[in-house]
Amino acid sequence: MFSFSTPSFCASLLLSCALSLPVFCQGIRAPEATGGEVLLENKNVRAVRYTIQPSSIVTLPILRNDSLLVILDGDAQETWSSSNRAQTSRLELGEVSWLRRDEENFIRNTNPQPSRILAIEFKDSYAVGEIQVPGSLRDPVNFDTRHFRLVLENQHARIFWMHLEPRETTEEVQFPLYLEIPFTSAQVSVFEPDGKFEIEKREPGAIAWHRNRLVSFSNQETHPFEELVVALRHPFCYQTSPQMPSGSTPVIVDYAQRVHTKLRKQWYRRLPFSIGEGEQALVTVRIKIQADGKLDEDDTFLAQVFAGNKLTETALRAVREAAPFPAIPPDWGKTQVDFGFTFLNNLPLEPQPGCEE
């Protein structure tokens, strides 16, 4: 004959489930993850960080959209869903798992220390009519396999692991809308195509959001730097109007339109197929026009490349063939002016669903 108290029995039962396979605990409801910290939220994503205590199981909130689970720290996490409790995935530091919408997902921390996870909800995962990001000549997987490794890809996102040894620099690579999730502390120099750069401080778990960057990264530390890059495959958001210099006057705006018209004529003349055919593509070229309207060869560079090699070269050739341009209006008061012009193929001129400001 023996006796027991209800609280101690429930505690023992939960502990036994935490140490056994999830298929044996189907009748036990794990506590819901609480106290999540929203690290970032915008119209496209919502990123929430949770802490899981040692040797415990939590249930993630059920979401209306697909999400990505990222292990921020801890080397022994097990995950499974309510629709497939018998299949458990074991994840370690920096690893990811794709979670379907409207499902219960469970996580067990088998570490003796608390662990942290990040749940990134993709708010556009079931949106209708959004444009997928076109392929790029500067895609990290094709252009810099030494520093970038593709760890997950589906119709909604592509996730890359970036590794930089001390003082190493990546090639110049193109990203659309994307998140950066560092796993080591570092000072990282971010170089733009025109040679300008900024030094960004990266800290583990401190995520950052960026839009359409063609950049290279340089690790300024004496230790390796690693991070996850989560790139959205939709929506594809872009600007079609000319990028103007600061302090532009109405006269310079009018001048930019005249230059743009000349460039577009060359672009359509040199397309390797009829308008409305071929791949979707976007190429932005920045140019620096001298006072007399001439364009030096080193004053032309790519600013965005969402296109293959053929259309990228077509855009650059259109700029070369359109030069020289009219002389800069005298009242600009400077010896040169720089613009950014975007060339499109099979893409609409107006903002699309998911991109409205």
Image (tube, rainbow, N blue to C red):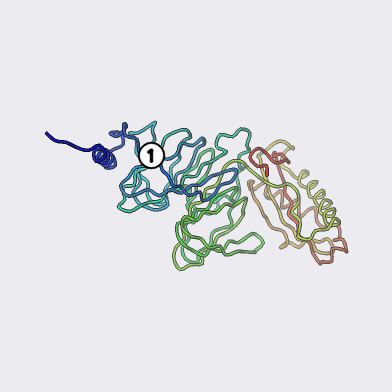
Residue that protrudes farthest toward the left in the picture: 1
Q: Residues within 10 Å of mark 1 (few under 14, many from 20)?
A: many
- In the image: residue 304, left or right of residue 184: right
Residue that protrudes farthest toward the bottom in the picture: 222
The quarter in which the N terminus is drawn is top left
Indicate whether 294 appears above or below 161. Answer: below
Q: Residue at x 37, y 48 (%)?
A: 52
Q: Position of residue 355 (x, y in %)?
A: 65, 42
Q: Residue at x 75, y 48 (%)?
A: 241
Q: Quadrant of residue 21?
A: top left
- In the image: residue 38, left or right of residue 2: right
Helix, strand or loop status at disc 1? strand
Q: Which residue is mark 1?
A: 106
Q: Position of residue 336 (x, y in %)?
A: 79, 64
Q: Quadrant of residue 192?
A: bottom right
- In the image: residue 130, left or right of residue 74: right
The quarter in which the C terminus is drawn is top right
Residue closest to the eye, 219 or 81 = 81
- Check disc 1 and give the amino acid type: Phe
- In the image: residue 35, left or right of residue 138: left
Residue closest to the eye, 93 or 155 = 93
The count of marks equals 1
Q: Position of residue 149 (x, y in %)?
A: 47, 51
Q: Position of residue 308 (x, y in %)?
A: 63, 46
